[in-house]
Amino acid sequence: SANYGGANTLWVWRSDVESFSRVQGLLRFALPENLAGATVDQARLELTVKARGSATSRIAPRRITTAWIEGDRQGADPAAGQGCTWATADGTVPWTNGGGADALASGPASVPVPEPDIVLAVEVAALVQDWADGEPNHGLVLLGDTAQGPCDAQFHSREAASPALRPRLVLRYATGLPAEVADAAPPQAALLA
């Protein structure tokens, strides 16, 4: 298994044939310190589409339940403990489900992937509320949904040359004071293939 933590693309691919391989994109955002115990009014994941190989492409974000390491490779095998792969969360420790990120089965409904250069926005407030309520922030995995056909989508990662293309998590939450708006940039992103 290879690590793609240093790649400038988050790719989500899944065939509508279950026996074929899959590709998942992982993201983890640094959250505001005062989010703990807050009420999350809105949390919008924004991803800029780089390419879409199928008009039927749909993605579903899910909360990751296992710690992982991003790594810095662009398709090479990581040294032990130096980055996640399809088989491991950090280059050594296996994902508990046998392949791909360990994630919650439920989450936001899948959304269609627009054409390239369009920003895909997905509401993920319930997932972020879990973090505000004390669940560990292990980030999100982007899963391909094949209910309407194959999924083949590529998004700009945090390594994109232009900051405007990088993934964002835009939060609106209340801590007992007036509502705050924060823009969390992802410190880590990886690709499982």
Image (tube, rainbow, N blue to C red):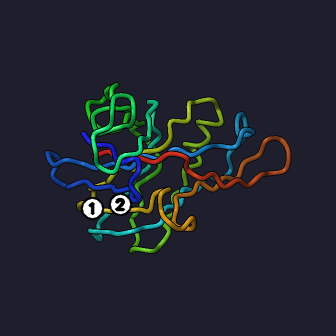
- Badge 2 vs badge 1, beta-carbon distance below 8 Å: yes
Q: Position of residue 98 (x, y in %)?
A: 26, 30
Q: Position of residue 185 (x, y in %)?
A: 60, 53
Looking at the rendered structure, the kind of residue marked 2 is Arg
Q: Quadrant of residue 55?
A: bottom left
The quadrant of the image that shows the N terminus is top left
Q: Which mark is residue 33?
A: none
Which numbered circle lies on residue 148? Answer: 1
Tell me the amino acid under the disc marked 1.
Gln
The location of residue 110, given as percent across then percent down, is 40, 55
* Left or right position of 53 against 48: left
The image shows residue 145, relative to residue 177, as above or below, that is below
- Quick one: label 1, few (<14), some, or many (20+) residues within 10 Å? few
Can you say whether 170 is above or below 112 in the image? above
Q: Which residue is mark 2?
A: 58
Mark 2 Cα-neighbour bin, 10 Å: few <14, some 14–19, many ≥20:
many
Give the distance between the C-alpha atoms of the residues marked 2 and 1, in whole angstroms: 8 Å
Q: Nearer the viewer, residue 28 or 125?
A: 28
Residue 92: horizontal and vertical position, in percent?
A: 33, 26
